[in-house]
């Protein structure tokens, strides 16, 4: 009986300590979520004002989609929309046009060459647009002009190639980022950076496709392959 009492006496403080750790963790998580929701609120407010003040809300769509994803990560993900047949040419045109407007030099403006006609892909429009956005942004940020986006068909797959003139040399600075042309030096280990290609790989895998990246000093080639929704007649692929 004495041994049992001693064991009980030793166990109670341990159990109380464990309970305190659990309660403390829940409180910290609750405070963290509240802090994140406040930041989300402050981010949403100016974006809503900006969306209402512009006659062309299309350039803001990626920002609003990313904001919705952040909301889901903080407060619980919402159900994903049902897959739909998407004509990738329209998405590619929107992405290329958006990034072409931001380029300061002619050589850095992406160009689109579409040879896949009206080929469609079954999937999530937001995720596919995000993958294309990341590919073009990556070419602008880490490569050199000319930057070309090409869409073509290969058997039952739609292939999108994003090609640029290769990585910058050690003596060539990256393009200006930030306000007023100020150059911001971003370190490679910054956890806020370097997620673009991972997102592209995840989107490709989720759509039954694949992503391949090839780099050299003179050429960078990113290839996104996706299965088409249905066979495309030869005349439609012209």
Image (cartoon, grey):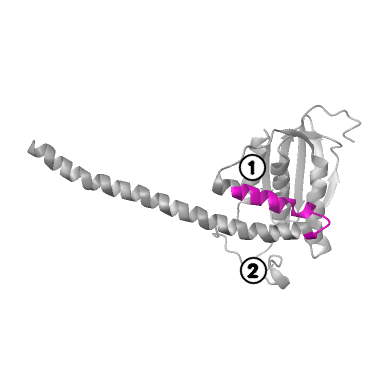
> Residue 84: horizontal and vertical position, in percent?
74, 33
Where is 28 relative to 170, above or below? Answer: above
Q: Quadrant of the C terminus?
A: top right
| Majority SS type along the magenta span | helix
Q: From the image, tell me which residue sits under label 1.
A: 201
| The stretch drawn in magenta includes residue 211 | no
Q: Along the horizontal axis of the image, is 100 left or right of 21?
A: right
Residue visible at 12% across and 42% down in the picture: 6
Bounds of the magenta segment: 53-71
From this viewpoint, is residue 140 visible? yes
> Residue 72: horizontal and vertical position, in percent?
59, 46
Q: Quadrant of the N terminus?
A: top left
Q: From the image, tell me which residue sits under label 2.
A: 184
Q: Element under label 2?
A: loop
Residue visible at 67% across and 41% down in the picture: 211
Residue visible at 68% across and 35% down in the picture: 207
């Amino acid at each position: 009986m004495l041994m049992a009492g001693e064991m009980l006496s030793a166990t109670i403080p341990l159990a109380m300590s464990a309970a305190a750790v659990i309660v403390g963790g829940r409180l910290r998580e609750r405070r963290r979520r509240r802090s994140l929701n406040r930041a989300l609120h402050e981010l949403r407010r100016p974006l809503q004002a900006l969306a209402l003040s512009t006659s062309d809300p299309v350039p803001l769509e990626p920002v609003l989609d990313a904001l919705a994803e952040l909301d889901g990560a903080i407060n619980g993900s919402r159900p994903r929309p049902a897959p739909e047949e998407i004509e990738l040419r329209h998405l590619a045109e929107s992405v290329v046009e958006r990034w072409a407007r931001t380029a300061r030099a002619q050589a850095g403006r992406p160009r689109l060459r579409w040879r896949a006609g009206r080929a469609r892909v079954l999937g999530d429009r937001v995720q596919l647009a995000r993958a294309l956005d990341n590919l073009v942004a990556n070419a602008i940020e880490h490569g050199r002009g000319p930057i070309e986006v090409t869409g073509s068909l290969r058997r039952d797959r739609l292939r999108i190639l994003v090609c640029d003139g290769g990585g910058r040399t050690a003596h060539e600075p990256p393009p200006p980022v930030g306000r007023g042309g100020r150059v911001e030096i971003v370190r490679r280990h910054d956890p806020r950076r370097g997620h673009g290609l991972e997102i592209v790989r995840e989107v490709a895998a989720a759509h039954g496709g694949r992503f391949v990246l090839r780099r050299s000093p003179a050429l960078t080639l990113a290839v996104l392959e996706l299965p088409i929704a249905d066979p495309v007649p030869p005349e439609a692929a012209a």
